[in-house]
Image: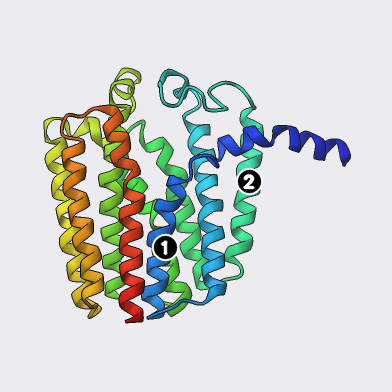
Amino acid sequence: MMQFAAYIQQRKPIYLRLMRWDKPVGSFLLLWPTIAALWLASGGIPSMFLVIIFVLGVFVMRAAGCVINDIADRDFDGQVARTRHRPLAQNALSTWEALLLFVVLLMAALGLVLLLPSSCLLVAVCALCVAMVYPWTKRWFPYPQVVLGFAFNAGIIMAYVAVQNTVPMSGWLLYVLAVMWTFGYDTIYAMVDQDDDQFIGIHSSALSLGESLLSVIGVTYGCVFIGLIVLGKMLAMNVWYYTGVLLCGVFFICQMLWIKQKNPKRCFQAFLGNQWAWLIILVSIAVSCLS
């Protein structure tokens, strides 16, 4: 047992890198819409118990998603400048060891789901299936970012089910808007690796959209902005909410200006900024619900 503990301690930095513990932006992009859904489903301050469960669940499932993604992409990551230093690409650990870590994370996630109403289990299983399929869609589906959007925002559906045991029309609208937003920012993220992806034959919406790339991202963001206004009308939100939506709209315009030249570094910075835009929406929802 002592030897096993020492081995785990020695390998911990590699496991943490595999789970992207040093790059929390993905976790925040999962967390803010999920907590926003909890606020809306609760009609105000959500149960602290639920907040803790969902926060832990977000970080555990994001880590699991990173692990299964790297397992799927282990033969490609070494050929991409941004990903060539990932543990599996460097053979810093075996595929079986990564799979074992993935199973451990799934067991932890299952433990959290079992603390929620039983109706959440079906949502969790469906979300897991989509999340596990996503890494392989990059091999055959021209727009894998769409699949990512559905998997990435399943926490919204689960939040409503946990609180209300159903998903109202406003909840489905929030989910669709989050899927569209994810498609937009992950397409921008894919622009960073566009040349490498084309060379190794991996699909992405950034490649598939071709000359329409910027136009589609712009239309997607425009639809999200309009959808957020509609959501506010449905829920009778006050001026604080619309202030947040307006700031988000300004952010979308800035995003389009940042990525106009398709410079990989600027595209990456634009992608990172989405965590703050989602946080603005979350804060505006919270303040509006409390006012």
- Give the quarter of the image for residue 224: bottom left
Assign a secondary structure to mark 2: helix
- Give the quarter of the image for residue 35: bottom left
Assign a secondary structure to mark 1: helix
Upstream in the sequence, badge 2 or badge 1?
1
- Residue placed under numbered mark 1 in the picture: 34
Callout 2 touching callout 1 (CB < 8 Å):
no
Which amino acid does the dot numbered 2 rest on? Val
Left or right, 13 with respect to 35, comes to right
Mark 1 neighbour density, 10 Å: few (under 14) some (14–19) many (20 or more):
many
Left or right, 125 with respect to 223, comes to right
Measured as percent of width and height from the top left, residue 244 is found at: 25, 64
Instruction: Identify which residue is drawn at 26% across, 59% down.
Output: 177
Q: Give the label, 2 or 1, closer to the camera.
A: 1
Mark 2 neighbour density, 10 Å: few (under 14) some (14–19) many (20 or more):
some
Left or right, 100 with respect to 151, comes to right
Which amino acid does the dot numbered 1 rest on? Thr
> In 3D space, how far apart are the residues under numbered discs 2 and 1 (Cα atoms)?
23 Å
Q: Which mark is residue 47?
A: none
Measured as percent of width and height from the top left, residue 218 is found at: 14, 46
Measured as percent of width and height from the top left, residue 208 is found at: 21, 32
Residue 167 visible from this viewpoint: no
- Give the quarter of the image for residue 235: bottom left
Please tell me which residue lies in front, 266 or 70. 266
- Residue placed under numbered mark 2 in the picture: 103
Residue 228 visible from this viewpoint: yes
Instruction: Identify which residue is drawn at 27% across, 34% down.
Output: 267
Instruction: Identify which residue is drawn at 11% across, 31% down.
Output: 211
